[in-house]
Image (cartoon, grey):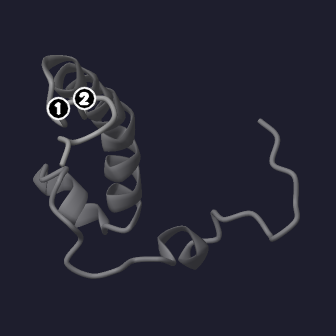
Amino acid sequence: MTGPRGPKPKRRFSRNNIFIYGTLLMVSMYYLLPLYVMIVTSLKGMPEIRMGNVFSPPVGLHLSRGAKHGHMPAQGSIVTF
């Protein structure tokens, strides 16, 4: 009988892998956190926004805040400033 064949497998968690995955995690959080805040804030009502809890999820969904007051453009229309 002979021993195992082939090259020795690489360690799964080397210093380089931990550094690379840590960097990727930090960069992804840097870009995804503002997107989360934008989406969560758009679903909140004005009193919840004024409370200042930016990261907390909305208590109730307010999908028609702008449409109720006529501030939403019609579907398919072009908005110019």
Q: Quadrant of the C terminus?
A: top right
Q: Position of residue 68 (x, y in %)?
A: 55, 78
Q: Earlier in the sequence, mark 2 or mark 1?
A: 1
State the mark number for residue 72: none
Q: Which residue is mark 1?
A: 11
Q: Secondary structure at mark 2?
A: helix
Point out the frontmost of discs 2 and 1. Answer: 1
- Whole-percent x and y of residue 42? 41, 60
The residue located at (63%, 63%) in the rendering is 71
- Identify the residue under disc 2: 26
Residue found at x 81% / y 48%: 79
**Above or below: residue 4 compared with residue 72:** above
Q: Nearer the viewer, residue 54 or 49?
A: 54
Disc 1 secondary structure class: loop
Rounded to the nearest whole Å, what is the CA distance between mark 2 and mark 1? 23 Å
Q: Where is residue 9, by image quadrant?
A: top left
- On the image, the x and y values in percent for residue 27 come to 33, 27
Is residue 52 toward the left or the right of residue 36 in the image?
Answer: left
Residue displayed at 33% across by 57% down? 41
